[in-house]
Image (cartoon, helix red, strand yellow):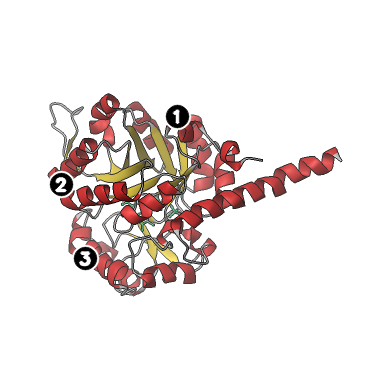
Amino acid sequence: MNADSIFATPITRRLNLKYPIFQAGMGFVAHAELASAVSNAGGLGCIGSGSMSARELSEQIQRCRDLTDRPFAVDILFAEVKADKNNPTVVRYASNVQKLIDITFEERIPVIVSGLGNPAGIVPQARKQGVVVMSLCGNVKQARRLEASGVDVIIAQGHEAGGHTGRIGTMTLVPQIVDAVRVPVLAAGGLADGRGLLAALALGAEGVWMGSRFVASIEAYAHSNYKNKIVEIDEEGTTITRCHSGKPCRLIRNKFTESWVGREAEIKPFPIQSVEYGFPLAEKARYEGKVEEGGMACGQSAGLINSIKPAGQIVRDVMVEAQAALEERFLAVRKSKAA
Ligand SMILES: Cc1cc2nc3c(=O)[nH]c(=O)nc-3n(C[C@H](O)[C@H](O)[C@H](O)COP(=O)(O)O)c2cc1C
C-alpha cells in the first residue's frame, strides 16, 4: 500500500506536499533549519516570525531557501492597531508586523499563517498573489468569522496545545469546526504521533499542525535543556498561565510559572507582560538553557515525546505509525472478517 497517496488530502495536493504534516510556526523555536528539514521530508515547514525583526525574518527566509527547494510557510502574530472607528472594515497592523508581512509577500512565500489576531487585512493581497492564508483558532465562532474574512485554511487548535491556547479540547473542537466551515481544516493540539494523525483525519481534518513534537527535534532553535525537559515531563508537566504574555499560554511548569501562582492580579495585559517579563525570561530559558527562569511553551503531548529526533525522522515516523495504526485498527479487522 502506498502511504503517500492514502494520506493525501485536498490541501496536500493544493500545496504539492507528500504528507499531511504541517510544522507549527513557533516563535523563538522555528527557524530555517527546522522549517527546511520538515519541508525536505515531505511536510510543510514554517518559520515562526513571532520573536524576529524584519531583518531577521529576511535572513531566515534566505537561509531556508538555501536549505530546501520545497515550499515553506511563515507564521506571523497579527497584532492590530485599533481600527478606525469610522471605517471598521479597515484593519491596520502595528508597524513591525506590517514589515514582516511586506517581506513575506515580497519573498513570494506561498503560505502565510496567522498565529494571533486578525489576518483579514492581508487577504486581498494574498488573493492577488495566490498566497494561501491559514489561521489558528480555538472555537467555532472564531472559525466562522475567519472563513467570512477570506481565510483559506482554519487550524483548529485545542486546549492541549503548547503556547497560547483556548478552552476547548482538540477532540471536540476539530469536528465542530469541520462541520461549521467549508474551507479545509488542520487539527492542532496534543498531536504528536501517527495515531494522532489518523485520528485527526478521521475527525475530518486535512492534516495535522504539530508544535511540541518538533521542539524536541535536533533542528529546533532551542537549548538542549529545554528539549530534554520536554522528554522528561509527562502529560501533567505543563500549566496554563498568563504570566508569559498576559494571555493564557501553556508552558512547562517550573519555578517561573509557580512564582506567579497567587499573584495573577499583578499580571499586566498582553503584550505588556511579554515585553516586560515573558520574552526576556523566555530567552534565558529557551536559548540559555536556564529552564527554571522563564517560560517554555509545550503541550500535553509531552507525555508522548520520548526522544529528541531529527525533524525529517519525526515526519517519516509519524507516517509509518499512521500506516501501522490504520492497518492494525481497521484493515486487519476487515481482513479477519473476510477470512
Ligand atoms: C514553543 C512553541 C511556540 C509557539 N509559538 C507560536 C507562534 O509564535 N505562533 C503560532 O501561531 N503558534 C505558536 N505556537 C502554537 C503552535 O502553532 C501550535 O498550534 C501548537 O504547538 C499545537 O499544539 P502541540 O504543541 O500540542 O503540537 C507555539 C507552540 C509552541 C510549543
Q: Spatial distance from mark 2 to mark 3, Cα to Cα? A: 18 Å
Q: Which residue is mark 2?
A: 96
| Mark 1 element type | loop
**Cβ atoms under marks 2 and 1 closer than 8 Å:** no
**Cβ atoms under marks 1 and 3 closer than 8 Å:** no
Looking at the image, which residue is at 62% across and 40% down? 2
Q: Nearer the viewer, mark 2 or mark 1?
A: 2
Please state which amino acid type lies under the numbered disc 1. Val
Confirm if mark 2 falls within 8 A of ligand 1: no
Say which label, 2 or 1, has the lower sequence index.
2
Determine the image quadrant of residue 201.
top right
The quarter in which the C terminus is drawn is top right
Q: Which residue is mark 3?
A: 280
**Cβ atoms under marks 2 and 3 closer than 8 Å:** no
Looking at the image, which residue is at 24% across and 32% down? 122
Q: Nearer the viewer, residue 151 or 3?
A: 3
Q: Which dot marks residue 181? A: 1
Give the left or right position of residue 17, taking residue 130 as reference. right
User: Mark 2 Cα within 10 Å, few/some/many (few <14, many 20+)?
Assistant: few
- Residue 208 at x, y percent in the picture: 48, 45
Give the left or right position of residue 193, taking residue 285 as reference. right
Q: Spatial distance from mark 1 to mark 3, Cα to Cα? A: 38 Å
